[in-house]
Amino acid sequence: MFRWLNILFILCLGIGSGFAQTDSTVKKPKFYILETDTIPNLLLKPDTSNKKKSKPPKKKKNVFYGYKCKKAFIKTLNGQNTILEIFYVLKEWKDPSPYLQNVYVWDMMNGVVKKMDKKDVANQPQYRILHGPYRKEVNGVLAELGAFYIGGKHARWEKYDKNFTLTDKTKYYKGWPKEAKISYYDSDQLKIKEVMPYEYGLLQGDYYLFTPEGNILTKGQYENGVKVGVWIDYFPNSSKRQRETKYPDSPYESTPPVIQKEWDEKGKIIILNGQKVDPNTKDNSSDPIKNRLKKKR
């Protein structure tokens, strides 16, 4: 019995010491509380948060299609109508495309905007090449709107009547109708071979055929898909005319074409009004009226 009492006494001591050890040696876990007024944004990218937004580059004033221009205007009176034209001209001279036969210029001496033969433009100091937006008003109402590219019509052109109703619209590309089919001699599309002027799916306007050197071989006009007026053929690598062929003035006429004039390489007429001319004629000039007067004398 004494033995059992010792065992009981030892068990009581172990239990008591265990409770004491728990109270004195075991540490309570610490809890950390995040105190904040806002929820942290874990997706915030520090490399972009402080970066300032870059401003878009300023658009250069009076620069169109890469060329600097000057703004000008013309105000004229036509009867009871006041016509205002607002346009831009190249600040520095630049030659128009060698394939354009006519260019639009501002004639500063006479105060008009007009279309001229390209050969007559470069030698006259009072002419300025049109380039950039163009606007025409009649009595304060828009009448015409478009743009130029180095003397040729470019982009969309619109015409309006006095009630501001659209009456016509045509698209151009650097002087040629936008719908025109242009073929080239080279893969870089720098040397034009042929210009087929299409509008609304029909041949309409000026036709050109060029040599590889840029000289005209043939030029004429189409109307509603039909050749009209006088078509001219030139000698290759020369500005001399070789042939003038007269087609009907209207596409609805059925008159067959006639060779009005044809010259040889020396400049003598070999065909006149569809008839061959005697090569032995002393005065074989291109003016038949003068020839008749000389014969009468």
Image (tube, rainbow, N blue to C red):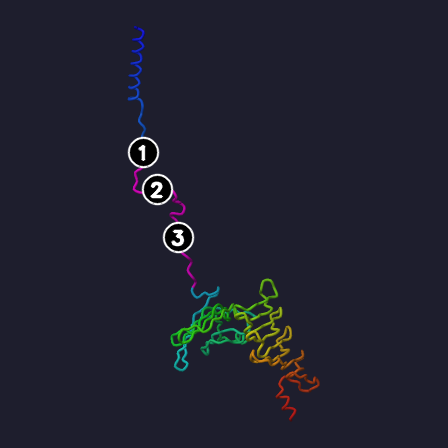
In the rendered structure, the answer to whether residue 105 lies left or right of residue 265 reads left
In the rendered structure, the answer to whether residue 44 lies left or right of residue 292 reads left
Residue 200 horizontal/vertical position (percent): 52, 70
Q: Which residue is mark 2?
A: 40
When the figure is inspected, residue 47 is found, relative to residue 155, above or below; the finding is above
Q: Earlier in the sequence, mark 3 or mark 1?
A: 1
Residue 217 horizontal/vertical position (percent): 62, 73
Q: Which mark is residue 32?
A: 1
Q: Which residue is mark 3?
A: 53
Regarding mark 2 in the picture, which secondary structure is present there?
A: loop
Q: Residues within 10 Å of mark 1 (few under 14, many from 20)?
A: few
When the figure is inspected, residue 12 is found, relative to residue 257, above or below; the finding is above
Query: Mark 2–mark 3 contact, CB under 8 Å?
Result: no
Q: Looking at the rendering, in which quadrant would you find the N terminus?
A: top left
Number of the front mark, 2 or 3:
2
Q: Which residue is more in the foreground, 255 or 292?
A: 255
Name the amino acid type tagged 3. Lys
Q: CA distance from mark 2 to mark 1?
A: 17 Å
Regarding mark 1 in the picture, which secondary structure is present there?
A: loop
